[in-house]
Structures are given as structure tokens and as C-alpha cells.
Amino acid sequence: MAAAEEKESKQATDFSGTWSLVTNENLDAFLQSQGVAYLQRTVAAKASITVQIVHKGDALNITTTISMKVVTKEQKVQLTLDGTVVDTTAPSGDAAKVSAVWSDDKTKIILDTENLTKKTTATIERTMPDQNQMKDVVTNKHGVSCTRIFKRIK
């Protein structure tokens, strides 16, 4: 089988589900490198994050809910996995842009994000190590990364 045929025949990972954040690794250093103040970093470390994904072919509907003790913020974005840039509003209320593409083997979604208000960027590499776990490795333009592990709750 030719390489192109093999690439097309590979089953793409389906990220559909509702995911709850379990751990953040290196979050404080990542946020600090993005210019986030100490108090905001402390609140972010304690936030509960749920991501709901409806994934059909190359279309993604992602709803991210961030809950803190008295405040809940939500971001909804519709993407296609072809690199199309979409204007959105980050949970912080800032204007943002996001785009998404498949990795070559269709096991990873690569999201490029830009916060237009704070002038920051990050790339998220989203994978599913198994059917009940989703992993985001978020890397900014300074080369600082944080890893977020989610468990499937639906």
C-alpha cells in the first residue's frame, strides 16, 4: 500500500466526550511566562475545567467551562481541522483567534491560539493516550510548556 493510501485509511481519533481536568503540570511557570500575575495564577491553579467536545469528521464544537468558587466562565468555538482561523472570545473575555489541524497520522489535534488583547500565543497538542484520558501539551512562544490531563466523564 502506498504511503498516501495508508495515511487516508488510518482511522482518525475521535475526541468526542465530556472531559474533566485532573492535573496541571508546570502550570505556574507556563502562566508566569505568559505574563499572568501571581494572584491570577493562584486562582487558575484551583479552577475546575470541563471540556465538552462534539467531533464529527473534520468538524469540532468545543465548549470549555472554567469554574472557580463563585465564577463560571465559558468559551464555545466551532472549528474545522483544516487550519481555518476563527475569531472567538477567551474565557477571560479577551479577543482571541484559534485554528486547528490534524497531525499527519490523525491521532493528534494541533490548536494554535492567539490572545489578541494580551498579545500571547500558544500551541496545544491534544492527544488521547486511551479512551478515557485526554492530554493537552500547551507550549508558548517562549518554549515553556504545561501539560493538562483530563479524564472522560461522559
Image (cartoon, helix red, strand yellow):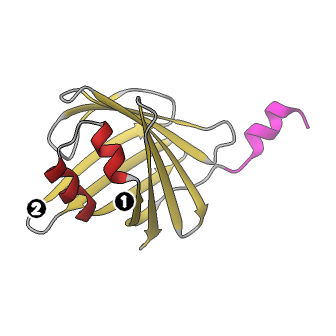
Q: Main secondary structure of the magenta part?
A: helix
Quadrant location of residue 14? bottom right
Q: Point out residue 81 in the picture as x, y percentages from the top left corner.
A: 50, 36
* Residue positioned 76% across, 44% down in the render: 9
Quadrant location of residue 45? bottom left
Lateral position of residue 103 relative to residue 6, left or right: left
Determine if the magenta segment contains residue 73.
no
Say above or below: 119 vs 6.
above
* Residue positioned 41% across, 74% down in the render: 153
Q: Point out residue 95 in the picture as x, y percentages from the top left corner.
A: 19, 31
Q: Residue reaching furthest left? A: 70
If the image is split into quadrants, where does the C terminus sit?
A: bottom left
Of badges 2 and 1, the one in the foreground is 2
Q: Which residue is mark 2?
A: 71
Q: How many marks?
A: 2
Amino acid on which the number 2 mark rests in the picture: Val
Amino acid on which the number 1 mark rests in the picture: Gln
Lateral position of residue 150 relative to residue 44, left or right: right
User: Which element is circle 1 on?
Assistant: strand
* Residue positioned 24% across, 65% down in the render: 46
The part of the chain drawn in magenta is 1-11
Q: Point out residue 17 in the picture as x, y percentages from the top left corner.
A: 44, 64
Quadrant location of residue 84? top left
**What crowding class fits label 1: few (fewer than 14 Cα within 10 Å), some (14-19), or many (20 or more)?**
many
The Cα–Cα distance between marks 2 and 1, rounded to whole angstroms, is 19 Å
User: Which element is circle 2 on?
Assistant: loop
Determine if the magenta segment contains residue 2.
yes
Q: Point out residue 87 in the picture as x, y percentages from the top left corner.
A: 27, 30
Q: Are marks 2 and 1 in contact (CB under 8 Å)?
A: no
Q: Which residue is mark 1?
A: 52
Q: Residue reaching furthest right? A: 1
**Counting residues from the N terminus, which is met first, the one under dot 2 or under dot 1?**
1
